Image: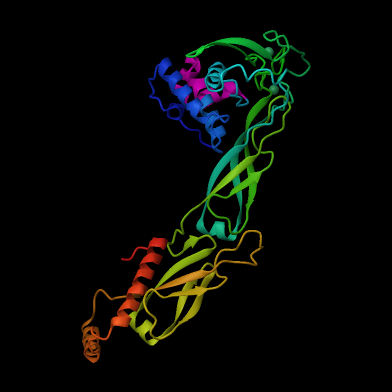
Amino acid sequence: MSKRDYYEVLGVSKNAGDNDLKSAYRNMAKKHHPDINKTPEAEQTFKEISEAYEVLSDQNKRARYDQYGHEGVNSQFGGGGFGGGGFDDLGDILNSFFGGGSRGGQRRPAGPERGSDLRLDIELAFKEAIFGIEKEIDIQHSENCDTCHGNGATPGTKISNCDTCGGVGQVKQTQRSLFGSFTQVGICPKCQGAGKIPTDPCKICRGKGKVDKDKKLKIKVPAGVDAGARIRVPGEGDMGERGGGPGDLYVVLHVAEDKDGIFERRGNDVYTEVSLAYHQVALGDEVEVPTLEGFTHIDIPAGTPTGKVFTLRGKGVPFLGTDGRRKGDLHVLINIEVPKKLGAEESKLLRELASLHKPTNKSSKVDKNHKNDDDSFINKLKNKLHINQD
Ligand SMILES: [Zn+2]
Ligand SMILES: [Zn+2]
């Protein structure tokens, strides 16, 4: 998963000063804090914002980030635990919303907390979504550190009460904001609310108890999925805090257009267009049409008008969960091709043909209406399908 640029996340320029950073962070945090913003992306966005701020607001980390990018600062955090970042400010922000003081006191010390869910977006080829596929995906999530088994202490060393909070996991903080000062109880910044800290922090995870791991996973994409579908992979999110289990991974599917430009999909129905010569529709013909699974033949009756749609039942996209027993339809739109260049012989024959036709201007009231209907239907269909007429 590629991370967004921290400056971009906060919407500030590369040479933004402390105050710019702070105010950008506060504005963004207000907008995206999951307590305030109930959209599904809020939590992820908020995490991104906190992480960006935690790095950019620290001179050292910022310098490393500027020089080495994300690589330069990731190792600093070991387990990707950005939760504590900017807590003071956050308390402040929430106070300004909720009148202050209401956030403390619910945990003493903090109990296990389930890890965050992760989101991974992948794009499927047009037919992969239709027929289903097993995909290998690369993810990065945090896991318990193998060396310390998640407790953050070098094996064999002691874990003692946190000296900052005396083991309760919380500290009183006085905050000043635009609305006056508040005393509030916040999570202890040293032990992150656990109340205990290792006397000799594990070297591998720097006492976090968690490490970021790259992992390959296989997921099964069922036949018939459409864009926007999510596949939940239980337990593959980030590891939780203080013994809380991992979150889940959500793989969000995007579906590419048909790369050959032959099919368009709407739900479980598929549309295609077949161009035929005038004589084929005038006289009738048996023609080959593409389907999702190769070609088939359809009979074109004599006198088929342009814009006619033939529907092949059950030749569309499988409905999810029916094991391919139920499928949508394939709609074949007939388009009459008018030759752009004619040979001498063709021109001659067409002129002869033309001379056989009586002028139909007068008698065509009904026909004309009918034709208009057809035209508008084609147009509607074309608009719907975004098929370009050349
Ligand atoms: Zn460790
Ligand atoms: Zn503490």
Q: Please state the quadrant of the image where ligand 1 appears.
A: top right
| Looking at the image, residue 119 lies above or below residue 49 | below
Q: Quadrant of the C terminus?
A: bottom left
Which residue is at the far right? Answer: 156
Q: Quadrant of the N terminus?
A: top right
| Front one among 2 and 29 | 29
Q: Is residue 128 magenta?
A: no
User: Position of 249 compared to 389: left or right?
Assistant: right
User: Position of 78 compared to 169: left or right?
Assistant: left
Q: Is residue 53 magenta?
A: yes
Residue 298 placement (x, y as % from top left): 48, 79
In which quadrant of the rendered view does residue 347 lie? bottom left
Residue 91 placement (x, y as % from top left): 57, 18
The main secondary structure of the magenta stretch is helix
Q: Which residues are magenta?
A: 51-78
| Front one among 377 and 112 | 377
In which quadrant of the rendered view does residue 293 lie? bottom right
Residue 378 placement (x, y as % from top left): 37, 69
What residue lies at 67% left-to-right and 8% top-to-bottom?
A: 164
Residue 337 placement (x, y as % from top left): 33, 75
| Looking at the image, residue 374 lies above or below residue 208 | below
| Looking at the image, residue 389 lies above or below residue 255 | below
User: Position of 282 compared to 315: left or right?
Assistant: left
| Front one among 49 and 140 | 49
